[in-house]
């Protein structure tokens, strides 16, 4: 490994069928006022809302409800939550939902006492919080983002047509996260497979970079193999606990900072995907699946050795008598056939992208260094065209 790093992760994870039993203990560490954030109603349908409210009442907490956190949370919703949290002197934000609710709660936690405009400070200027931060706890119901054990928070500004993620530090990570794979059984198939692809993409964004022999890459290969194996089972039987629990844990490790340690990283699929999201409000994982293959075909020659290794170590391609180019090509074909098998979106057209959006999406794409090849504006346009 060539890079230096610091590793620590402050989030306590409670995992398994009885994980919610730990909530009481966690709640005892915080004051009375709990901001309960959740989405559009799935937790009411599943009965989880009632269970959590009963625990909160049992602990003598004062519940302030903040429902309606939408997929791809917006700045308007952020301002609403920040105001509510401050007015009610909130001691803990309890996020019950998927990545959107969890990301949103982190954004509220750093915005409630922020004296400046939160969007400008955190998402445009990428500054760190200097105000009081409200602690966040999470009960996860949808798997994919890794938000349950990281400092990421992605917010959308529809007016400016920007979707931007800020990776906050340890002080913003959830203090605890409750992960019961059974909660994910009710996630609709489309969302479920979008989450599977999001996990794969998080791993690839960290794996497909660098030339050094790096422990993180071996961990990534193991995570990808587990994901491919379990995703094939879960698409046929979404209630398979073994598969869903493996996927839930893989998602957490895919983006809790461990596998990015000592590595350069390439987040261009996410950068393009987020720009697509700003224009279409499409499901996050599907914005990634739609552009991935065109992106990887664009950078493959610059990172041929790693793409060949991906083919052999993740997809089990027999390397005998083959050049790196042949292997890399076969690896991407195997990857594509897995994508088709689990049923992710393969084209931007399906997400509502039209030709007149190319220029805007390319402009809204932050071009990063760190991958095998730095894209130009024209290459982003070309990737969009080839993803239609
Ligand atoms: O709102 P409800 O009714 O709860 O429905 C949600 C929502 O419509 C539904 N859902 C969640 N759990 C369910 C369920 N439906 C039935 N049963 C359940 N158990 O699923 C829909 C999508 O939920 P959402 O939270 O939006 O999905 P996801 O977890 O994929 O989160 C996406 C957001 O996370 C950001 C994305 O950009 C996007 O805004 N990301 C956050 C990252 C991070 N923190 O590090 C990294 C990622 O790359 C990603 O960018
Ligand atoms: Zn993602």
Image: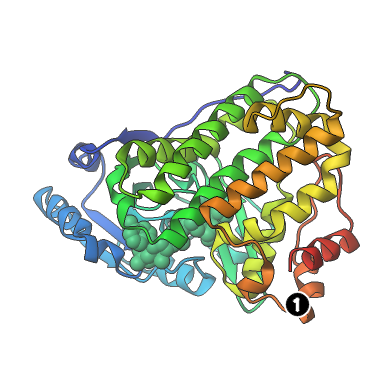
Q: Is residue 280 left or right of residue 97?
A: right
Q: How many marks?
A: 1
Q: Residue at x 76, y 24 (%)?
A: 319
- Foreground: 71 or 298? 298
Q: Position of residue 236 (x, y in %)?
A: 40, 50
Q: Quadrant of the N terminus?
A: top right
Above or below — where is 30 with respect to 260? below
Quarter of the figure with residue 112: bottom left
Q: Is residue 125 left or right of residue 174?
A: right
Quarter of the figure with residue 41: bottom left
Q: Which residue is mark 1?
A: 357
Specify whether residue 34 is in view. Answer: yes
Q: Residue at x 36, y 71 (%)?
A: 68
Q: Position of residue 289 (x, y in %)?
A: 63, 56
Tell which quarter ligand 1 is in. bottom left
Residue lying farthest to the left in this orientation: 58
Per the image, label 1 sits on a secondary structure element best described as helix
Quarter of the figure with residue 333: top right
Q: How is the image coloured?
A: rainbow
Answer few, some or many: residues within 10 Å of disc 1's Cα (few below 14, many 20 plus, some between 14 and 19). some
- Foreground: 170 or 17? 17
Q: Quadrant of the C terminus?
A: bottom right
Q: Residue at x 63, y 23 (%)?
A: 218
């Amino acid at each position: 490994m060539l890079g230096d790093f610091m590793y620590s992760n402050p989030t306590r994870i409670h995992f398994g069928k009885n994980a919610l039993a730990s909530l009481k203990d966690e709640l005892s560490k915080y004051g009375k006022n709990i901001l309960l954030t959740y989405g559009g109603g799935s937790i009411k349908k599943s009965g989880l809302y009632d269970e959590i409210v009963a625990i909160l009442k049992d602990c003598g907490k004062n519940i302030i409800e903040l429902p309606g956190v939408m997929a791809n949370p917006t700045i308007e919703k952020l301002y609403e939550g920040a105001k509510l949290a401050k007015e009610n002197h909130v001691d803990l934000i309890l996020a019950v939902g998927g990545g959107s609710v969890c990301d949103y709660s982190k954004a509220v936690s750093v915005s409630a006492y922020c004296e400046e405009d939160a969007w400008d400070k955190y998402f445009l200027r990428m500054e760190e919080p200097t105000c009081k931060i409200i602690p966040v706890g999470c009960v996860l119901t949808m798997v994919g983002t890794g938000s349950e054990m990281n400092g990421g928070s992605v917010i959308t500004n529809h007016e400016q047509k920007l979707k931007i993620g800020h990776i906050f530090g340890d002080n913003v990570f959830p203090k605890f996260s409750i992960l019961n794979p059974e909660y994910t059984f009710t996630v609709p198939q489309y969302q479920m497979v979008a989450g599977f692809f999001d996990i794969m993409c998080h791993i690839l964004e960290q794996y497909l970079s660098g030339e050094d022999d790096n422990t993180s890459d071996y961990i990534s290969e193991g995570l990808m193999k587990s994901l491919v194996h379990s995703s094939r089972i879960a698409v046929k039987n979404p209630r398979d606990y073994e598969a869903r629990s493996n996927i839930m844990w893989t998602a957490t490790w895919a983006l809790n900072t461990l596998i990015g340690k000592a590595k350069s990283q390439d987040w261009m699929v996410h950068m393009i995907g987020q720009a697509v999201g700003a224009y279409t409000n499409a499901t996050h994982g599907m914005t990634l699946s739609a552009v991935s293959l065109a992106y990887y075909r664009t950078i493959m020659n610059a990172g041929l050795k790693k793409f060949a290794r991906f083919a052999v170590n993740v997809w089990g391609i027999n390397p005998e008598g083959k050049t790196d180019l042949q292997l890399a090509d076969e690896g991407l074909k195997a990857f594509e056939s897995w994508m088709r098998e689990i049923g992710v979106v393969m084209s931007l057209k399906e997400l509502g992208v039209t030709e007149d959006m190319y220029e805007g999406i390319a402009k809204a794409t932050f071009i990063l260094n760190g991958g095998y090849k730095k894209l130009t504006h024209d290459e982003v346009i070309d990737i969009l065209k080839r993803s239609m």
